Image: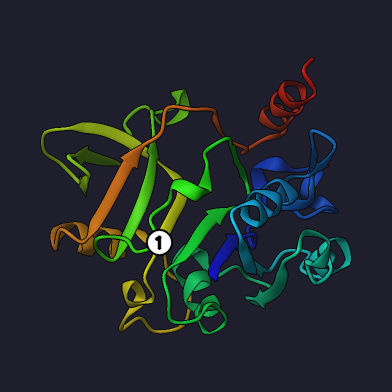
Amino acid sequence: MRHALIFAAGLGERMRPLTNHTAKPLLSVGGKPLIEWHLEKLASIDVRYVVINTSHLADQFPDALGDGSRWGLRIRYAYEGPTPLETGGGMLNALPLLGPEPFIAVSADIYSDYDYATLPLQPAGLAHLVMVPNPDWHASGDFVLNEGQLSEDGEGQRLTFGNIGVYRPEFLQGQTPGRFKLLPLYQQAMQARQLSGERYDGFWRNLGNPAQLNELDAHLRGS
């Protein structure tokens, strides 16, 4: 049984005023909360156990999503406290709930038609990341993809991390609980050639502000 983590603890500052009273992953797009699109996709590939990390307006998540049974899922919530722990600290905080096997991790504030079923059950290294063509707002990209391996520099395609990946728990080995980003761990894994990746050219959107949310809503409604 595959497990998954959904990052949902952000403050949604650029999405204000919408996020003053509604957690960003619970904003409606295409007729349902954004996070529901992820839950449905995960359930469709036989993921049955999902951890959602929370911070800002955390109480709204169990009220809106319950225990996950309506999707055939079991949802557990990993509360980070009033201040989000960043991606690294949030993943480490959720790790005790995720079990010993590799798990899928996805950010709640993206939307994509990427098929989660194509993610490797066992990444070749410590983690496997889905990379996308660089959007206008991030033209320089994040990492270089060359023959399935990611690096900071060198020959190959410079792409943007699409916030979809598979991680082994060992990826976080030796980390101390608290606030920290995943970037230094990606850098360490790349130096050890333990970070694989793939390019995805399909529909993918990062939802950072109300205009992007409205654009996606119109797309999903076919208007």
Indicate the amino acid at tag 1: Leu
User: Total of numbered circles in the picture?
Assistant: 1
Q: Is residue 31 left or right of residue 101?
A: right
Q: What residue is drawn where x is 31% and y is 31%?
A: 140
Determine if residue 23 is in view: yes
Q: What residue is drawn where x is 17% and y is 40%?
A: 147
* Quadrant in which residue 146 is drawn: top left
* Residue 93 percent across, percent down from the top left: 53, 79
Q: What residue is drawn where x is 35% and y is 81%?
A: 175
Quarter the N terminus occupies: bottom right
Q: Residue furthest top?
A: 223
* Residue 183 percent across, percent down from the top left: 34, 58
Identify the residue position indicated by label 1 in the image. Answer: 121
Quarter the C terminus occupies: top right
**Placement of 24 over or under 94, stated as above or below:** above
* Quadrant in which residue 186 is drawn: bottom left
Determine if residue 24 is in view: no
Q: Is residue 177 left or right of residue 75?
A: left
* Residue 33 percent across, percent down from the top left: 79, 47
**Element on which disc 1 rests:** loop
